Amino acid sequence: MLKKLNNILFFLATNNIYTLTIMSDDEHWHQKVLAEFGKKVAKWKPPQISYEIQYEELNRIDDPNLAAKYARMDILLNLKSKGKLPDMEGANEVVYVDNLKMLKWLKKQGILPTSLGARWAEGLSYFHIVEWLKKEGIHPVWY
C-alpha cells in the first residue's frame, strides 16, 4: 500500500498541470534571470528570444568573443562579472554586426577594434562606425 501511495505522489509531483504551467511561463524565467543575473543583465534580453532561452544562453555561453559576434550585451555583462571580456577580434565582430552602442561600451572597458574592423565598416557602408573609429584613431587599411 505504501509503495502504491508513493507512486501516486510521484506521479502528481511530476505531472502537476500547475507546475508545468509555471515552468513554461516566461515570467517564471524572467524572475530566474533577475534572481541569478540581476536587472542590468535581464534588461538586455534580445526581443526575439524568450527569457527561458536567455537564461539557458547566459548559463551556456562562456566565450566573450562569441557573445560580441552575436551582439549579446546581456551575455557580455554576465561574462564581465566573471572577469571575461572580448579581445580586439571580438570588437571587430561588433563592428561587423553594426553595433555602435556596444563598441562604445567596449571602449569603456579598454577594448577597441583594429584597422580590419574599420575596413569592414567601410566595406559594409557603416559610415557612422567609420567616423567614430576615425575619431578613436582607427582607420581602415586596404592592402
Image: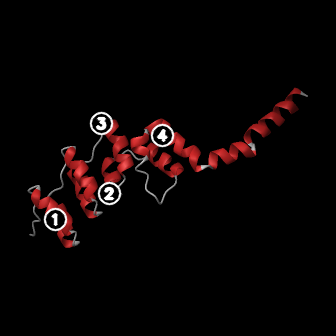
Tag 2 or tag 4, which sits nearer the N-term? Answer: 4
What SS does tag 2 mark? helix
Give the residue type that dot 3 points to: Gly
Label 2, label 3: how far apart the Cα atoms are: 18 Å
Circle 4 sits on which residue? 34
Question: For residue 130, which numbered disc appears in the image?
Answer: 1
Q: Nearer the viewer, residue 3 or 69?
A: 69
Quarter placement of the N terminus: top right
Amino acid on which disc 1 is placed: Val
In this view, the mark in front (3 or 1): 1
Residue at numbered disc 2:
69
The kind of secondary structure element at disc 3 is loop
Cα gap from disc 4 to disc 2, whole angstroms: 24 Å
Q: Is residue 76 left or right of residue 42?
A: left
Decide if residue 50 is in sight here. Answer: yes
What x and y, as percent, mark residue 56? 49, 47
Image point (34%, 53%), residue name: 66
Q: Are marks 4 and 2 in contact (CB under 8 Å)?
A: no
Determine the CA span between mark 1 and mark 2: 18 Å
**Residue linked to disc 3:** 83
Question: Residue 73 appears at what percent x and percent y?
Answer: 35, 50
Q: Residues within 10 Å of mark 2 (few under 14, many from 20)?
A: some
Residue at 38 percent across and 47 percent down: it is 75
Amino acid under disc 4: Leu
**Is residue 138 shown to the viewer in this render?**
no
Secondary structure under the numbered disc 1 in the rendered image: helix
